[in-house]
Each structure stands twice: as structure tokens, then as C-alpha cells.
């Protein structure tokens, strides 16, 4: 899994696992699979290369909590040299990379199937999808 942290709703108390971004690759059939970080998870991931990033966030069209592609490279990245050029191999830069590539990708929401902006934790804060209360990160990280 990618790099993320937990946030709690100050009103209803629900805890959310949030994710800044997770690298993915596409299989020959076009299925999204986690790429692994900082190393490819397996041989197939390594062979296919890093295609881009997915993230958990709120769809700005339907308001649902979804996981969607937020950025995608024009071509998958297969070598360390290619990835270093983009800064992908540096974990601290994950968010920056997403910012850099975010505007280039039109996200399609898996729930409403519309072209949308997926509002992620790394980009801006948003209210609790259940009650509208304020969410506060509690400082626990997950990987
Ligand atoms: Zn809430
Ligand atoms: Zn949607």
C-alpha cells in the first residue's frame, strides 16, 4: 500500500485511513494493480513499469469517498534512471510528484463515472463525508 495517515472526525468520531498516493501499473488487460514502494512489489510490476498514482479522496462531482487515478505518466516508467528524472524514487517527494502530474490527468470517478477532480488529503482538507464535521489528522502513519 502507499503512504498514508489517519484522520478523525471531530463530530462523529469516525476514523479514516487516508492516502496521499499509491503507485500503480496496468496489466495487459488494463487492470490497475499496486506497483509497490519504493521497490516494485513483484516481477510483473517491474516489467510493466510505474504508470502513475492512485489516491483515496472525495469525488468533487458525487461526493463519494473513492479510489481513483489522480496522475498518469505519458509512458510507464521502467528504469531507475527514468524514475529519478521525475523524482519518483524519492519517497519524500511523492506528494510533489502528484502535484506536478495532477493537472495532466483527468480523473474518472469509479462511482459516478464522471470526469472529476478527486480531492485528496495531500491537496486540501475536506469535511467528513458522513456528517460534514471537521477532520483532523491524528499523526498515525500507515504504509
Ligand atoms: Zn463525521
Ligand atoms: Zn463521483
Image: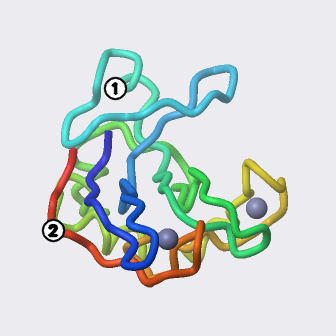
Q: Residue at x 48, y 56 (%)?
A: 55
**Mark earlier in primary sequence (2, 1):** 1
Q: Callout 1 environment at 10 Å: few (<14), some (14 to 19), or many (20+)? A: some
Q: Residue at x 36, y 37 (%)?
A: 78
Q: Quadrant of residue 130?
A: bottom right
Q: Residue at x 37, y 34 (%)?
A: 35
Ligand 1 neighbours mark 2 (CB distance < 8 Å): no
What x and y, as percent, mark residue 97?
35, 68
What x and y, as percent, mark residue 83?
28, 52
Q: Which mark is residue 18?
A: none
Q: Residue at x 46, y 53 (%)?
A: 53
The one of 6 and 46 positioned closer to us in this rendering: 6
What x and y, as percent, mark residue 50?
41, 41
Residue for badge 1: 46
Residue for badge 2: 139
What x and y, as percent, mark residue 33?
49, 30
Label 1: state its secondary structure: helix
The one of 31 and 101 positioned closer to us in this rendering: 31
Describe residue 43's horizontal placement relative to residue 68 as left or right: left
The one of 111 and 83 positioned closer to us in this rendering: 111
Describe residue 40's horizontal placement relative to residue 25 as left or right: left
Is the N terminus in the top left, top right, bottom left or bottom right quadrant? top left
Q: In the rendered view, would you say 74 is above or below 136?
A: above
Is the C terminus in the top left, top right, bottom left or bottom right quadrant? top left
Label 2: state its secondary structure: strand
Amino acid at each position: 500500500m502507499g503512504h498514508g495517515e489517519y484522520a478523525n472526525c471531530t463530530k462523529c468520531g469516525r476514523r479514516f485511513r487516508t492516502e496521499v498516493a499509491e503507485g500503480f501499473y496496468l496489466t495487459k488487460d488494463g487492470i490497475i494493480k499496486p506497483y509497490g514502494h519504493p521497490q516494485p512489489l513483484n516481477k510483473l510490476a517491474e516489467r510493466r513499469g510505474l504508470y502513475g498514482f492512485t489516491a483515496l479522496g472525495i469525488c468533487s462531482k458525487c461526493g463519494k469517498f473513492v479510489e481513483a487515478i489522480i496522475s498518469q505518466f505519458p509512458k510507464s516508467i521502467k528504469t531507475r534512471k527514468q524514475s529519478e528524472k521525475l523524482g519518483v524514487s524519492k519517497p519524500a517527494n511523492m506528494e510533489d510528484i502528484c502535484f506536478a502530474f495532477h493537472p495532466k490527468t483527468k480523473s474518472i470517478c469509479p462511482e459516478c463515472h464522471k470526469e472529476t477532480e478527486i480531492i485528496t488529503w495531500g491537496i486540501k482538507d475536506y469535511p467528513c463525508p458522513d456528517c460534514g464535521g471537521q477532520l483532523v489528522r491524528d499523526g498515525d502513519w500507515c504504509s
